[in-house]
Image (spheres, rainbow, N blue to C red):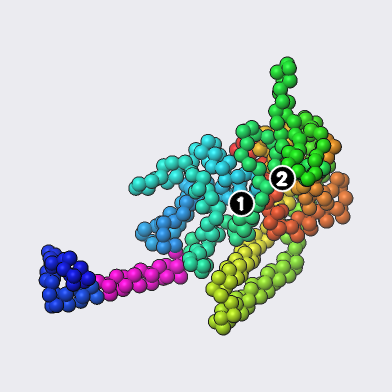
Amino acid sequence: MYLLDNGALKDMKFPAYVFDNTSQGKFMLQIIFSYSKYYVDSLSENVRRGIRRKLDLGILPNRAPLGYWNDKVRKTIVVDRRSFPVVRKIWDLTLTGSYSPRQIRNLSEQEWGYRTPRRERSGGTSLALSTIYKILSNPFYTGVIVRQGIAYKGAHPPMVTQDEFDRAQEILGRPGRPKTQKHTFAYTGMIRCGGCGCSITAEIKVNHQGYRYTYYHCTKKRKDAPCFQPSIELKQLERQLLRLLHRIAIAGSIHDWMTRYVVSGQHERTLEDERELAALQRTISDAERSLSSLTDLRVRELIDDTDFIARRQKLHAEVARTRETIARRIANPDYWFEPARLLISFSKLAVSWFERGNVEVKRLILNVVGSNLLLLDKKVSIQAAEPFRLMPKNTDFLRLCAFVENVRTLADDPDFKRRIACIARLEEMMRVSDGRP
């Protein structure tokens, strides 16, 4: 209109319309502008309404992430049978705490031979590192669709629980993770110096005869506290680690007895389980009351939008996590049996696995056994994890009972779940190594 007014445009002619540079022509042009503006605004409103409708139904209004696909017939999102197990394996490896996204990417390309689903203009390639990070940070895999800070219950089957998702975020964000190295060493990033608290690193030395030796020593990065701790040779270090593993090892007869004891006690926990379920239901009720109170605070403008959204998401996550726990316990009252079986089996086989395992196996075993590995005066110490502190060395009935009860208590503990995930991965690796199906 401005260009017509100042004469920069003489007039405007289109196949269906002609607008002369007159008052009548410009009036008609304004009317067409008004119609087009109304059409665009109305279309935008209808699209937003359709998106809200899909979100209320639990359907993602976009392309489904890897592991799922869009069913164009039923207008919903369903499991992709080819990629779903691969993505679940990515989560499993991450939850062990022993694999970085880059290592998982290399496994998917070199060992699994996985290629992304082919689409019209993309697909058929190996997983990118950024794709791994997107998978591990997407709450869609928990069965929740987050849109503009609001969480909607998805209609698709979840791949991971809310608790597993939270643990993955902690693992990805934890400080002190080992960096990429030129050589692969089994224990770097896991042991700290008992003298100054710095990390223990490793290097390869070659003597005059050409023999190669691996030594572990302090990085000595603290300027304020010089460290004079000596280095230790790999064979000497592993002998000490084997002695530590022998402390939690159990004989085959005790393993069989403990397994029978756990099986016999599977169905004798009904009353305790009912009390635990009632406590979980109270947790949900308390969280829902907190959500109601939070809404009242926002209505009265006692908190801002940012604080309101953050608190609401936290409460929604707590409710979702508790409901998942209740559903799992109702569907599987023996939820603690498989962790107990894995733990007992690991205690029997850890020493043999360590002796014949590769670097990856040895790291996983140490991740299971404990934490806070310290090297002081060429001696290694480790803080044993909770279950192994009560591991019975003989057929002591009271210690057996204490061990089983401890496993049941820890069944929902995030760190305990991480260790169980490591054991499951170890079983899979050793089964493949032995050529068993």
- Numbered tag placed on residue 367 in the rendering: 2
Which residue does the image show at 41% across and 63% down from the upper left?
61
For the stretch drawn in magenta, the main secondary structure is helix
Residue 327 falls in which quadrant of the image?
bottom right
Which residue does the image show at 68% across and 47% down from the upper left?
176
Position of residue 8 relative to residue 233, above or below, is below
| Residue 298 x, y percent position in the rendering | 56, 79
Q: Is residue 293 left or right of residue 204?
A: left
Give the magenta part as a residue range. Answer: 35-59
| Residue 379 x, y percent position in the rendering | 84, 37
Number of marks present in the image shown: 2
- Numbered tag placed on residue 200 in the rendering: none
Q: Is residue 2 left or right of residue 289?
A: left
Which residue does the image show at 76% across and 53% down from the upper left?
262
Question: Residue tagged by mark 1?
Answer: 172
Of residues 170 and 203, which is closer to you in this image? 203
Position of residue 49 relative to residue 399, above or below, is below
Position of residue 408 relative to residue 362, above or below, is below
